[in-house]
Amino acid sequence: MIVRLLGEGQFEVDNGLIGQLNELDEEIGRAVEAGDERGLWDGLAALAEIVRENGRRLSDEELTPSDAVIPPEDLSLDEARELLADDGFIPDPVAT
Amino acid sequence: MSGLWSRFSLIFKAKASKALDRAENPNETLDYSYEQQLQQLQNVKRGIADVTTAKKRLELQYTSMQQQVDKLDGQARDALKANREDLAREALTRKAAVQAQLQDIMTQGQQLEAQQQKLIEGERTLSSKVEAFRTQKEVIKAQYSAAEAQVRISEAATGIGEHMQDVGLAIDRAKDKTQQMQARANAVEELSASGALDDFTSTGDDIDRQLQQISQSGQVDDELAKMKAELGPGGEAPKQLEGDAKEEEAPPS
């Protein structure tokens, strides 16, 4: 699976990590709902860390679209809500 | 996987495919994509230049804020010499507020510096990718059937489009941040440029609240005591006050 860390670049990560990433993703969703900015940042940082640690960075010559994108670690609660409010974008990218 | 990150990637994909829908056959799509990429690369470069300019402006503002800190300090000394401890206290209170803001803005400026580095890095990657696309598009034209080519182009163009959006988003965020800092710096400048003795209770903004907090915190008392000690006992004749210092004698409302 190809994951983009916004502002940083793309990484190829093992599909076996999806479960772990999903758990964090759900935690982030709960933090945003609870208005917990610290929790949002911690969650995003943790997501990015797993990808950096376990992923292979794509070279500049690889022109591949990402399967998932992780927002920047300093995303504000307002920005996060804006993204989450858009219920039209729910389909599951893992299926592609 | 329906959280933040999947949403981001889907937004990217939707945008990229919309752009590609405009062209019909693979060769057209290839050339159109490449042209678009070059154009967007220019936009990215302009965006980064804007951020750099805004940051420089902000740095000039640090300097002028520092000068205002010095000026308020001087006003406090003058007021003390004139035995106007109340005015000295106000000047020092403002000085502390401006200093606190200045420090905060400078910290944010350092964060902006780091973001700027990332932008430059992102632009460099983007240039490499556009160049790689140029090479690949010739290979695709020469070697693949129309259907295969369409798929490959779509992949590559989406990949590049995604990176464009990424850098574009980072530029927008950096610009927003710079503007917010600019607005804060302007507010502080207005406050301190108006001199220590104008009515600042009527503006009722954040800085006023901070002023109150700071004056309660004892920091001003400490500094006032220090200043008194430096100036020696039994303040000087009011004669020493001149120029704008005289205007300060109007009682604060």
Image: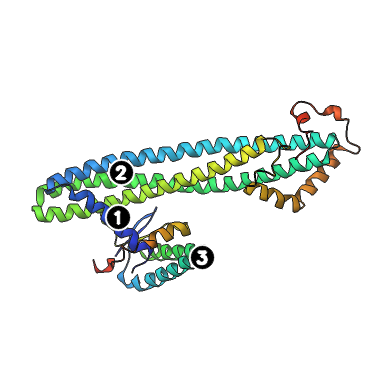
Q: Is residue B117 left or right of residue B32?
A: right
- Residue where numbered disc 1 is placed: B12
Query: Within the image, what quadrant is residue B10 found in?
Result: bottom left
Q: CA distance from mark 1 to mark 2?
A: 19 Å
**Residue of label 3:** A36
Q: Is residue A32 above or below residue B183?
A: below
Check the picture and name the quadrant holding the N terminus of chain A.
bottom left
- The answer to which quarter of the image holds residue A18 is bottom left
Near mark 1 (Cα within 10 A), the count class, few <14, some 14-19 or many ≥20, is many
> Which of the chains bears the disc numbered 1?
B
- Secondary structure under tag 1 reads helix
Q: Residue at x 32, y 73 (%)?
A: A16
Residue, disc 2: B127
Which label sits in the foreground, 3 or 2? 3
Q: Is residue B43 visible?
A: yes
Q: Is residue A89 left or right of residue B72?
A: left
Quadrant housing residue A66: bottom left
In space, the residues marked 1 and 3 are separated at their CA atoms by 27 Å
Same chain shared by disc 1 and disc 2: yes
Residue B155's x, y, as percent? 21, 55
Of all chains, the one bearing label 3 is A
User: Relative to B75, does residue B140 appear above or below in the rendering?
Assistant: below
Three-letter code for the amino acid on which mark 2 is drawn = Ser
Where's the C terminus of chain A, which quadrant? bottom left
